[in-house]
Amino acid sequence: MRNLKYLVLVLISSAAFAQDNLFPTAKADSIIKNIQLPVIPSYQINITQLGAKGDSVTDNKKFFDKAMALCQKKKGGTIIVPKGIYKINGPIHFVSNVNLKIEKGAKIKFSDNPKDYLPMVLTSWEGTMLYNYSPLIYAANCTNIAISGEGTLDGEGGKTWKTFKAKEGKGKELSREMNHTNVPVENRKFGEGYFLRPQMIQFLNSKNILVENIRIENSPFWCLHLLKSQSITIRGISYKSLNHNNDGIDPEYAKDVLIEKVNFDNGDDNVAIKAGRDHEGRANTATPSENIVIRNCNFKGLHGVVIGSEMSAGVQNVFVENCKTIGYLKRGIYLKTNADRGGFIKNVYVQNIQLDEVEDCIYMTANYHGEGKGYQSDISNIHFSNITCNKASESGIVIQGFPDKKIRNISLNNIEIKEAKNALSNENAANVLMTDVFIGKRATVPTAAK
């Protein structure tokens, strides 16, 4: 009788898990409904009215600054950038209630002189808060802001900034040491001499954000960084940014985010969901990255959707659907963390993904680079359905936990990988449910005995 009760309990639990692994469309829809688009006042100013010239030579920095000041005086408005190439020697700093509208045929081309991005501002670098060069477009503590239009932002990242990569080691290691030893953020001063490249666009502590239809080219570092911000819509944008570490979109400690109809072509992860690094991240578990919907995107670059590796405050409630590759991709969906991070990844749902040729199709590892100790991450409730891949030159599906910290509650439903060098590597995982999973040629009826 006791064994029968146990069997009934197992069957009920299995049935509940099978139901939970379906893509919860209603939950994704409720996140989108909670996202507020920015409300922009009716005031408009054309940048050329202030003296700006789209001749690719004139430094238009003071005219953009003046336009922002006018908008602030008017309690907000739209800055119109008409057709032309507008050189600007320094960053654009947003104020609240402003739409920077870059019209079709317009390009803002930023200088690549690092001195133009001083004085330093509060920012983050690979998961650690610090003071560094200003991002090229920077909004801190703003509400109701937008970057729109069909024009282009050019970060000029392929020359001077590109040389910083080989020299960033000292600054990178110092930033991590300051993270681990709890140095006060106000004492974390970098900038000149440390070679930490700035992000192209960063929103910090801001909300009600829209980035729509623009093109991002040639970023110095991460392209679009959503840092400690919420209620964000990114849609219809495109990329051509192939420098070092050119992640496309990095939500970090971000909440209520919609990413849709984006055409990626960048030199690193397309979307990389992060939540701080190591000790600092674990101290911020009240603000995980959460409620993120990614849909109807075209992937091209290093990896499609990534969670980690800096995710120490936790990542939860991520919904990815109806996306496909339009060119090279090393990995399709990639969850990566290690024993330095801690934190959690949970409630991730991925459906209707079409991949062409990749190195690895689905990859989940708690042992990224084999680094770290003492802070193993908790990975659970990860669900994949309706995924196709033409070829995986390495692995079809990889799941790697730890013996004493297993990845758990994983479902794979209707997965077809037509060719793979290594089909499946499933290590230190618990409660992995596979239904209609095909790797390689599908088996048919067994042959008759001869």
Image: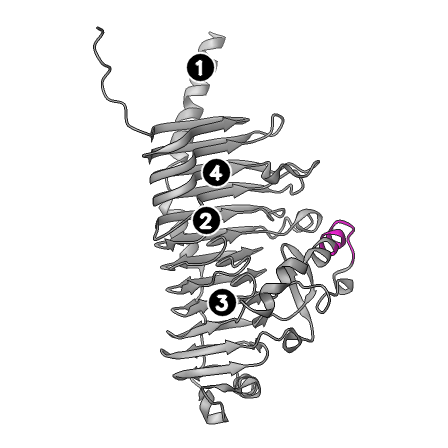
Report the front residue among 82 and 84.
84
> Is residue 277 toward the left or the right of residue 85 in the image?
right
Q: Is residue 69 above or below residue 333?
A: below
Q: Label 3 neighbourhood size at 10 Å, few (<14), some (14-19), many (20+)?
A: many
Q: Amino acid at mark 3?
A: Asn
Q: CA distance from mark 2 to mark 1?
A: 38 Å
Q: Label 2 neighbourhood size at 10 Å, few (<14), some (14-19), many (20+)?
A: many
Q: Label 2's element? A: strand
Q: Amino acid at mark 4?
A: Tyr
**What residue would you read off at disc 2?**
305
**What residue would you read off at disc 4?**
363
The magenta-colored residue range is 174-183
Query: Whole-percent x and y of residue 284?
Result: 66, 51
Q: CA distance from mark 3 to mark 1?
A: 59 Å
Displayed quadrant of residue 10: top left
> Is residue 214 toward the left or the right of residue 131 in the image?
left
